[in-house]
Amino acid sequence: MKAFMDENFLLSTETAQHLYHNHAKKMPIIDYHCHLIPQMVAEDHQFRSITELWLGGDHYKWRAMRTNGVPERYCTGSDTTDWEKFEKWAETVPYTLRNPLYHWTHLELKTAFGINKILNPTTAREIFDECNEKLCQPGYTARGFMRRYGVEVVCTTDDPVDDLRWHRITRESGFEVRMLPTWRPDKAMAVENPTTFRAYIEKLAEVSGVTISKFNDVIDALRIRHDFFAENGCRLSDHGIEEFYAEDYTDAEVSNIFNKVYGGTPLTPDEIRILKSAMLVEFGIMDAESGWTQQFHYGAIRDNNSKMFRLLGPDTGFDSIGEFNTAKAMSRFFNRLNDRDCLAKTIIYNLNPSANEVVATMLGNFQDGSVPGKMQIGSGWWFLDQKDGMEKQMNALSLLGLLSRFVGMLTDSRSFLSYPRHEYFRRTLCNLLGRDIENGEIPVSELPRVEQMVEDISYNNAKNFFKF
């Protein structure tokens, strides 16, 4: 019987162990998509407790706690103490066996704090106190954790109207980890609510210096902000969409629809899709002209629980995997950009594992030989960034594309303790490849090639792909 989370955790063969310990483990981390708060990096935030660091904003844990019968006040409430919230999480942990939270919890305790104890109600107080004691020491700050995990680059997620001051402050401070912005223009496409949309466009007009009265003015303003992001080191865009939009439209139609919503009149579902189709094309053109990589996170149904949305707002743990028939729309969208020679490097993060093969084959239609792995199926995302989801994503990519050209893992997290997800991914990758070699599915003579492949997927591919 193997010990829990020993040095060969998730590594079932000697070859897998060799690949991880001698090749994957040593590679730095490029976290090319995350939701870290830039101000916390700029100010080298000191965490008041493990509760702030671990449970603040972590909807993964909140979902598990709610499922375990924990009242909401211990998840998101303001009338409970840090200890009380931590205690409720510790009571939940033993019930998370076979959920990735069990692995992540103990991997983070081990790698960040050197704690090898199992978290449960009996050990909760001593672990809480030990973590908090260390959080008062140098090296246990926002920047300290980034250094501890060997982070080289992080790309945050930022709105076009953001002034990026915290990125500049961090860069000018001489901090050795590069923190770069990522262009996330979702609010510029959020036309479902005319009042909110108008307020956003007015803010865009203010920061860009463009007087906006028509659709083309919006695009001009966004181009100015796109250039501003590029000047501040941005290399990627990101789009959170339910599905792909690729309706046919004319310039006149788009202008009329924009005038309607900007004037305060709600749009029909068809009008929403047309306007979003036009916006996505304009964003794709901007990215191609700038040499950026465009990312699409699609397939989530967000804010399902309207009662809790009214109480807590978005990103509080009430989202789920959706079912969308998007293959034809995805094809039309890529084809539209490709016909104009404006198809940028692209990463698609699919949230429904049943569509892995659909996405993998679709991307193969638009590989053009200009860049290795130009069209990427992204790593397991959100509900899928765990062992089973990672394996399914890599198997689909292996069978229908080139795993060797994969740009690897990211955290997609707001937490400074999420970097062990890179280790978790690397162990899973090495286990897959090591098993293939020992099963005779990859010739042992190709071990040097596999060793290089592991280092490339862990680090080199991302560094070269994004030109960091």
Image: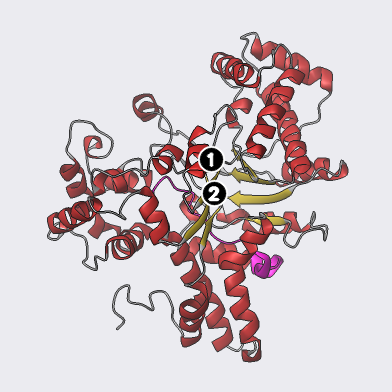
Pointer 2 with pointer 1, Cβ within 8 A: yes
Q: Element under label 1?
A: loop
Q: Which mark is residue 33?
A: 2
Which residue is outermost to the bottom? 445
Q: Label 2 amino acid?
A: His
| Residue corresponding to mark 1 | 157
Whether 406 is among the magenta residues is yes
Q: Which mark is residue 308?
A: none
Q: Is residue 340 above or below residue 106?
A: above
Whether 197 is among the magenta residues is no
Q: Is residue 106 left or right of residue 33?
A: left
Q: How is the image coloured?
A: secondary structure
Q: Is residue 256 left or right of residue 163?
A: right
Q: Is residue 435 above or below residue 357?
A: below
Relative depth, front residue between 136 and 159: 136
Relative depth, front residue between 279 and 372: 372
* Residue 284 lies in quadrant: top right
**Residue 417 seen in this snapshot:** no
Q: Is residue 315 left or right of residue 274?
A: left
Residue 37 x %, y %? 43, 40
How crowded pointer 2 is (Cα within 10 Å; few <14, some 14-19, many 20+) is rated as: many
Q: Kindly identify the residue that appears in the image at 62 percent across and 69 percent down.
A: 456
